[in-house]
Amino acid sequence: MSLFDKFQQIAAARQALIEKGLRSNVVMEKVVSPTEAVINGRHVILAGTNNYLGLTFDPDCIDAASTAVRKQGTGTTGSRMANGSYSDHVQLEKELAEFFKCQYGMVFSTGYIANLAMLSALTGTGDVLLIDADSHASIYDGCRLSGAEIIRFRHNDPNNLAKRLQRLGERASNTLIVVEGIYSMLGDRAPLAEIAAVKEQYGACLLVDEAHSLGVLGTNGRGLAEEAGVENRVDFVVGTFSKSLGAIGGFCVSNNPAMEIIPLAARPYIFTASSSPSIIASTRKALKVLKASPELRNKLWENAQNLYQKLQGLGFQLGPEISPVIAVRVPGIDQAVALWKGLLENSVYVNLVTPPATPDGGCLLRCSVSAAHTPEQIDKICNAFESQREALPAAQMA
Amino acid sequence: MTDYETLLKRVNELLAPFVEEGTPLREDSDFVADLNFDSLKVMKLVEQVEDEYDISIPLNILPDVQTVKDFVIQLQKLKDGQE
């Protein structure tokens, strides 16, 4: 038994993919725009980036980042606990709190760290984390770090959640429920009003990860809690800068006074170097753009509806509801790889997702739509899928 | 105290549909090495057992479960803790 034996299973899975012609992870030789890149020398449309508002090339965001890097340098070279905060970190926290109409805001270096930090700081030995079964890996990893008891409830099932809270009895008051605004693999929303009602009935706390719903849902783009009208019933909102805000980083906003202590209690926060000035500057600008440009959200949803309906019309099996995350279901890995390669050869890049990263053991060709996609690009994505229909047997079409 | 043998019998019945025909199902069968379980199968089995006994099985116990016997022992502890 060697140190490296544990890699055998992963190595075998990797070898199987290589034998199917997938030699390595995709490398983008040139990124041309929010929706275009050059891959293997071919100009492709990007339909798997999570760049929901297309802000990665926004001129104002680029200017803000450029100015910050010149004035404040390339990095902070340490954690905020040790090195201190830059005033822009604090400003961004204030702006996020204000945007979400919350008392407290806190910024993290990545969205992954935001979940690790919040879950591990809010819960510990003797507490319970009650998480949706389809939660993102950052939620599972945050749970592990916490030392709390981890219980899953069935995906998007408030009755199953209630049953589990009932079983906990008095411990329900020491329970943090964790759900996501939009689930990253299938693009479905949590039934948040029902979940909030259950959490209130049992006296638990509720954290919502709006990673894929910030800037996407709600009249003002604040996410699912805003759309569902339950913002004042959600205890903690976590999110990321790496999707609709076009940068990298994470945040938490809340009205709970525990937020004053979290920076002193969350090890993933305390021991991570803080975000570079350029990241904070472009994020602050992107948040302003998000607030001032509801038309981007409208464009995003037009594109999402257009792509979902066209792919559905072509007979592909899709996720359960229209959203900017559109997952094409493919049962077998051979067909998924063939379809994915065929799409790339037709100049369209989407995400190939295989088990165990998928919720139900099947494979997904996961598309994410951007406000920056033109109607012509959406048509080209559909045409590429249409050209690859033969990769799937008729029985596997809707 | 919950009877181990009764639990084992029922767990074996719940396990059977997840195991390939011809694969022997024993008390010391290893979920991964012998029964070819992956994480998805584990979670489906957990859900079925949770429904069967009206309990919640914390994920924290899973690192201590390698064999069918380990699983039944953990289940027994959970059921006894509930009673």
Image (cartoon, coloured by chain):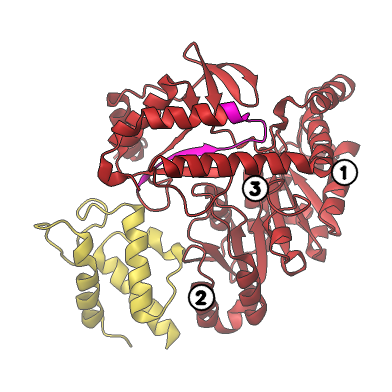
Residue that appears at 88% across and 37% down: A88
| Magenta stretch: includes residue A366 | yes
| Magenta stretch: includes residue A337 | no
Q: Which chain contains the residue that carries disc 1? A: A
Type of the residue with mark 1: Val
Up-down: is A322 above or below A127? Answer: above
Type of the residue with mark 3: Ala
Mark drawn on residue A211: 3
Up-down: is A206 above or below A72? Answer: below
For numbered disc 1, what is the local secondary structure?
helix
Residue that appears at 72% across and 54% down: A218
Q: Quadrant of residue A173?
A: bottom right
Q: Which chain contains the residue that carries disc 2? A: A
Mark drawn on residue A206: none
User: Which residue is labeled 1 in the image?
Assistant: A90
What range is drawn magenta here?
Answer: A362-376
Q: Are marks 2 and 1 in contact (CB under 8 Å)?
A: no
User: Which residue is labeled 2 in the image?
Assistant: A159
Give the left or right position of residue A346, taking residue A118 as reference.
left
Type of the residue with mark 2: Asn
